[in-house]
Amino acid sequence: MNIPNSLASYERLRSAPLTVNLNRGSSVESTHRVHAVVSDEKGRVLLNAGQADYLTFIRSALKPFQALPFINSGTAEKIACRDKGIAICCSSHNGSTKHAREAFKILWSSDLNVDLLQCPIPKGCRSPLEHNCSGKHSAFLATCKKMKWPLDNYLDGKHPLQLEIFRRVSELLGQPYEEFIAARDDCGAPTILLNLSQMSVLYAHLSKSSHADLEQISRSMVSHPELISGDGLFDTELMRRSHLQIISKGGAEGIQCMAKVGDGLGIAIKVEDGSKRAKHAVALHILRQLDWITPSALQELEEQILLLSPGVQLEVKGQLKFQQN
């Protein structure tokens, strides 16, 4: 990865973070600090606010890359998994019937039992298929069966599946996967500790068509935005209103990643306190600055996503700044 590692260079990649104020009437009630970065697929930081090297877990924004072994192993092709199935592998869905059905199709086509899923059963639900990561876990199991890898410990960080995911991510970043620090995500799968510039590089790669497997994944995501999160939720609604030109995938604790199809640019956002409302506000603020979406679409998203009580508003302060060589 072509990101400077000297202290002086890193200092150059730091600027004032964005702030998101929750205003009640004329008073500021809460403030969130937010770091954001835009990079290209070569690892060059083009714009940033705050620390481009801010270190945090990528959480569910890793999902499109966790789907790579499902594609590369030939599993998706073998079970005739089309764009909908690939999209559900990348999703953090809301557990609706249509989402659970797509995850189940992967298991059924692979002759696998639902009981093999190791994602939790959500509170008030009856099946792990209703968990927001069930698509990812179904693809994990299908891949393991195709490759004759163990099924009972597929979430172990040293399992061949997880090592293959680490290897593919390391290839995209140009960093040995042995250097990765991984930890258990809420669904039980490993997630990786990365800096924001690395996350934005991954999404820059996702936006390009130079990798056939990533192109297949990005096409599936934008072709079926309803499967990525759900009706009324940020990722789904943003992709719909961008006329399927923006790839959007959030993660827990204030992570949001985006890319524009074909541009080779990726965006990564981290809210220090993990606020969901702040990451959505900043995402729309950045999209406005980059002119990636029409003003009318932005207004619709703000009205739908940033739902607040009367007299309360979110205000984003600051701008992404261009880097100078």
Image (spheres, rainbow, N blue to C red):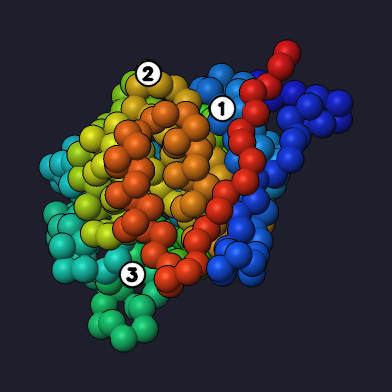
Q: Amino acid at mark 2?
A: Ser
Q: Residue at x 32, y 34 (%)?
A: 294
Picture coordinates of residue 22, whole percent (x, y): 58, 63
Specify the amino acid type for callout 1. Ser
Asked if marks 3 and 2 touch (Cβ < 8 Å), the reply is no
Mark before the other along the chain sequence, 2 or 1: 1
- Helix, strand or loop for disc 2: loop
Front residue (pair 148, 244): 244
1 vs 3, front mark: 1
> What SS does tag 1 mark?
strand
Direction front: furthest residue = 26
Residue 141, image x, y percentages: 32, 57
Task: Please report contact status of discs 1 and 3: CB closer than 8 Å, yes or no.
Answer: no
Q: Residue at x 75, y 35 (%)?
A: 14
Q: Kindly identify the residue that appears in the image at 35 percent across and 22 percent down.
A: 262
Seen at 50% across and 32% down, the residue is 289
Q: In the picture, residue 307 is in which quadrant?
A: bottom left
Q: Quadrant of residue 180?
A: top right
Rendered location of residue 299, percent (x, y)? 34, 47
User: Can you say whether 190 is above or below 117 in the image?
Assistant: above
Residue of label 3: 131
Look at mark 1 in the image and give the residue it sits on. 39
Q: Nearer the viewer, mark 2 or mark 1?
A: 1
